[in-house]
Amino acid sequence: MAGRRQPPASELRSVTMLNPYTSPIERIWYYALRIICALVLLFLVLPVLVIVPLSFNSGSFLVYPLQGFSLQWYQDFFNSAEWMRALKNSMIVAPAATLLAMGFGTLAAIGLTRGNFPGKALVMALVISPMVVPVVIVGVASYLFFAPLGLGSSYTSLILVHAVLGVPFVIITVSATLQGFNHNLVRAAASLGASPLTAFRRVTLPLIAPGVISGALFAFATSFDEVVVTLFLAGPEQATLPRQMFSGIRENLSPTIAAAATLLIGFSVLLLLVLEWLRGRSEKLRTAQ
């Protein structure tokens, strides 16, 4: 009716969020649940964020209150031969392990998704077991396997074990992407004369690329942050950034560690943003099919 008053926009938003017929108890629980969720999120994030201001402290100790603003610890990080060697090792090991995990994980996911054979569940459990087994057990087993071969302190053993740790993440993400994959597209390509390799390269891979890249990012983050396996398999020349941080905490607690941790936090946030973008792109591709 023309004479009826239109509710303001704030009331319309509250109506969409809460049913107007909810009881007072339900309204209290509605807001209490959101407050509890916010407190839990703060509890999880606050310990990570506390380290960031300390990396800009001009003092020599990791304590509050801050004594002043300074970038000297970042300067120490980039001017230190040990930290730069550790960063270089991380940038060698993590990309190499990611490439191996991405290749083997993608092929394993395609085989497990398309194939139906006895013991499929057992094979799936075995390939994702590195994500379930305690990493210290993986470290001990890897050392006992590679040490007799003379590869106990080498890039080879470190890259191979990091790749094994990253394979389950690739398998899970690619398998999830393949659940919505239209296999008629591959059959159509085969009917037009495309070989299996060509069909995979021109049809399958572009459509599952978001899942492959997401798994690769998870594998990269797993390798880049891994410290337990590195303690068993890496010598002084193969020490990665997390191991250097671990050694620094044990031997010489310096705010340079806070600077390194802040850089890792920023890197992790960047990875999360890329993963969220890939997730949205994967949803669009799945809808387009």
Image (cartoon, rainbow, N blue to C red):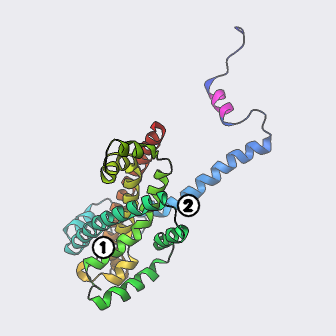
Residue 271 visible to the viewer = no
Q: Quadrant of residue 54?
A: bottom left
Q: Which residue is mark 2?
A: 43
Asked whether residue 24 appears in the rendered view, the answer is yes
Pointer 1: what residue?
A: 159
Element marked by disc 2: helix
Q: Residue at x 70, y 45 (%)?
A: 30
Indicate whether 278 appears above or below 131: above
Question: Which callout, 2 or 1, points at the residue further toward the start of the chain?
Answer: 2
Mark 2–mark 1 Cα distance, whole angstroms, equals 35 Å
Residue 283 locus on image (x, y percent): 47, 43
Amino acid tagged 1: Ile
Q: Start and end of the magenta stretch? A: 10-16
In front here: 201 or 126? 201
Asked whether 13 falls inside the magenta stretch, the response is: yes
In this view, the residue farthest toward the bottom is 148
